[in-house]
Amino acid sequence: MKADPSAQLKLLDVQELDSRLDALRHQASHPPEGPVLRDLESSRAALRDQAADLQIQVDDLTRAQRKADDDVEQVKGRKVRDQKRLDSGQVTNPKDLERLQHELVSLDRRIGELEDTELEIMAHLEDAQRDLAEVQAHLVEQDAKAQELDATRLERLGGLRAEGGEVVARRKEVAATLPADLLALYERLREQKNGVGAALLRQRRCGGCSLELNSGDLAVVSKQPADDVVRCEECGRILVRTEESGLR
């Protein structure tokens, strides 16, 4: 294949632009915030689960406290009624009076037991509410950190996309000046060779595979006309020759 040496030099410009585009795409798909955001999401998911479990505990204990309050009030109400009967003097039968007094003692004991239960439930409820508040506060903190990191990621992504648009436009402009067959060969090789289709031959070394040409290959390349499109014998990439190639 033949191509003007100036076109071959421009091919290096296209390669540089393509390499920059590859780097921009990699940066966009592998943001530095990514690992931290993934760790934060895992942590936040665990906190959300923990908060949900604690909320269930708080709800259950709130219902239990309400029931305990009702139980205490119910027994206290019964005691008030019995005490009124006793104080009114309506109960005159000694046996009925003894039973009523015994019941009042039993009700006092029952009230004490229920109030102990009520206090125990209240203590558990306060613990659960405190734990829930701590988890929720931690979750709010983690959410804020994740939002801040994501905003930074999106800002960086916007910058990468803007630069990428400029590089694409410049690449299109330079590629339009190249012979179609040379560009097609380059693009095919670039696809096959990990994104590098053309490389500078500098000081007898291929910039694509970094291997130095042996004396035999070097002699062949030295004799080829400047408009010949030369390929590296080791990696197959297009070799662009300049004054730095060390062919003289």
Image (spheres, grey):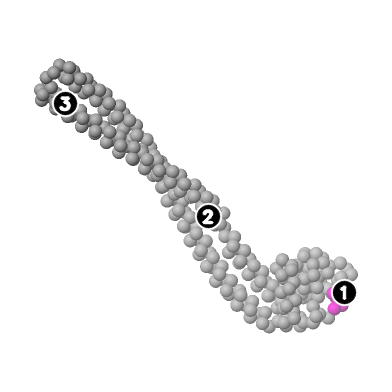
Q: Is residue 27 left or right of residue 78?
A: right
Which residue is pictured at 13% across the width and 18% down the height?
A: 93
Whether residue 243 is visible, yes or no, is no
Image point (82%, 67%), residue name = 234
* Residue kind at label 1, given as amino acid type: Val
C-beta proximity under 8 Å, tags 1 and 2: no
Percent position of residue 111, x then y: 26, 28
Callout in the foreground (3, 1): 3
Q: Which mark is residue 37?
A: 2
Check residue 83 in the rendering and tell me which mark sits there, or answer none: 3
Q: Residues within 10 Å of mark 1 (few under 14, many from 20)?
A: few
Q: Main secondary structure of the magenta part?
A: helix
Residue 247 in the figure: left or right of residue 106: right
Who comes first in sequence, dot 3 or dot 2? 2
SS label for mark 1: helix
Question: Residue at label 1?
Answer: 220
Q: CA distance from mark 3 to mark 1?
A: 121 Å
The amino acid pointed to by label 2 is Leu
Residue 144 on image: x %, y %: 44, 54
Tag 3 secondary structure: helix
49 in relation to 154, above or below: above
Q: Is residue 13 magenta?
A: no
Q: Is residue 81 above or below residue 216?
A: above
Is 184 left or right of 121, judged from the image as shown?
A: right
Identity of the residue drawn at 20% across and 28% down: 79
The image quarter containing residue 75 is top left
Image quadrant occupied by the N terminus: bottom right
Q: Is residue 78 above or below residue 133?
A: above
Magenta residue span: 220-224
In the rendered structure, does residue 222 fall within the stretch colored magenta?
yes
The part of the image, by quadrant, that contains residue 242 is: bottom right
Using a 10 Å C-alpha cutoff, classify the residue at mark 3 as few (fewer than 14 neighbours), some (14 to 19) or many (20 or more).
some
